[in-house]
Amino acid sequence: QNQSYDVVVIGAGGAGFAAAVEAKSKGANVVLLEKMPTVGGNSLISGAEMNVAGSWVQKNLNINDDTPERFAEDTLKGGDFKGDPEIVKVMTVNALPTAEWLKNTVGVQFEDDNVFQFGGHSRKRALIPHGHTGTEFITKFSALADKMGIPVITNMKAEELIKDKDGRVVGVKAVSAGKDYTFNAKGGVVLATGGFGANAEMVKKYNPSIDERFKTTDAPGTTGEALYMAERAGGQLVNMGYIQTYPICDPISGVIELIADARFDGAILVNQEGKRFVEELERRDVISKAILDQPGAYAYVLWNDNIGKISNTVKIHDTEYDAFTKQGIMHTADTLKEAAEFFKIDPAALQATVDRVNKFAKDGKDLDFNHRAGLKDLSTGKYYIIKAVPSTHHTMGGLKINTKAEVLDANGKPIPGLFAAGEVTGTTHGTNRLGGNAYTDIMVFGRIAGAGAAAQAK
Ligand code: ADP
């Protein structure tokens, strides 16, 4: 089984779709390979918010002082300055045109009256897709790929890159249902295979502190063998020990509690003693660590209708609401006392915490943890409370690329014909990826990789 294309894209998540569509629109003959039975990867199950400075939604909300430079500064700082400033610059400068492309060409619909402010960002800048998940992106991308005539082959696992005698990557060997296939690539191969957060062994190998206590938020295909495949072809792996845990996940399955995104609108975090212990908009690593330091190594997210009405997470994530309520890890109560009693928290202690929050909300200053967006009033019900633990979420490390999304070898030289984009790369986020930056990264660099590979097919 031998097939030839201009561009072979490996991995049908957000980065892979962006690369494939971009390459096709530049006139290349493209194929998209996916090892799992279904497309989407982590991109599908993500909340899929996407940071953009200077967006039309920010304008609608009168946020007029955001710039790519500010966005870059937040991103670099959030990753302890271990991200590559050139890569971050490309991401932040291209965020707006890429979001416009997603909206106008791909047909992704974003809410036009709300943006999230994730931890570490100095402005509210994360666009929110309809439905608050990656389904909006992946559905639209799948439809467009179909319309453009891009074959998307599922159950097809790439296993080895093929190089010619000059060291150029000219294709990939893949396997489907025990049969071998070869996909030749005239212009180039784009690796868009995601990270390795669902590979517990690999996570522990690169970061021994993330051990058996952690479940994962990731899609089952996020197992990272493609990183070794690229390494065998000469690709340089960097920052592999930087692995992000997401602080607010289901203690039973490990998945993210998107319903608890009410945190971005003012929900507070308390421990079993009913006390706040960290600023709720702190970085994910800081909050994760703070939770592990609490009694029982878990926390609760608490909000009320006053906060809930802002982005309506209970309604939008109604399947989560039903499932978590049934599991007994989430509870809805008319009074704070009832919310406390459900989880055996001392009601008086929780009341004292909430009274303090209400006072800080009124005064506009959180004297305990300096909540950067300002606390909100929690004096009236209904109340929503959910138990949460950190899980392995995003692997910041991966292949070293340059601003053209070319994969670099151990000497920092591009490997001809090999491109990479998305979570498989290791250069953007440094020690810690800020919320909403994955989608910006995968979309911007997915397009660059696709265009680059298409250009070399000429
Ligand atoms: P990103 O956010 O970077 O696009 P995703 O996790 O969304 O990453 O997508 C990566 C996709 O790549 C997943 O659907 C995953 O199953 C797929 N994948 C990973 N390794 C391979 C491989 N060796 N061959 C084909 N597909 C792969």
Image (cartoon, rainbow, N blue to C red):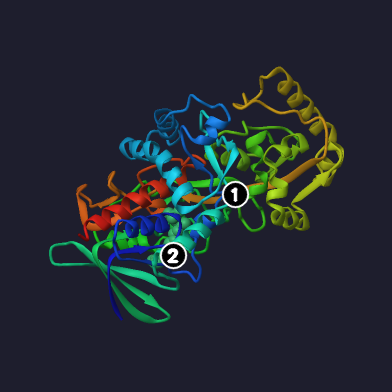
The C terminus appears in which quarter of the rendering?
bottom left
Q: In which quarter of the image is the N terminus?
A: bottom left
Callout 2: few (<14), some (14-19), or many (20+) C-alpha neighbours within 10 Å? few
Task: Residue 98 in the image: state x and y as whole percent.
Answer: 41, 44
Q: Which residue lies furthest to the left in this view?
A: 166
Amino acid type for the residue under numbered disc 1: His
Query: Residue shown at 79%/48% (left/top)?
Result: 331
Classify 202 as above or below 51.
below
Kindly identify which residue carries mark 1: 130
Please name the residue that numbered disc 2 is placed on: 147
* Residue 124 horizontal/vertical position (percent): 55, 32
Tell me the crowding category of disc 1: few under 14, some 14 to 19, or many 20 or more residues within 10 angstroms, Cα based: some
Q: Which amino acid does label 2 sit on?
A: Lys
Which-is-in-front pick, marks 1 and 2? 2
Residue at horizontal 74%, vertical 52%? 329
Task: Tell me the SS state at disc 1.
Answer: helix
Q: Quadrant of residue 267?
A: top right
x, y percent for residue 242: 43, 45
Distance CA(mark 1)–CA(mark 2)? 22 Å
Which one is in front, 79 or 421? Answer: 421
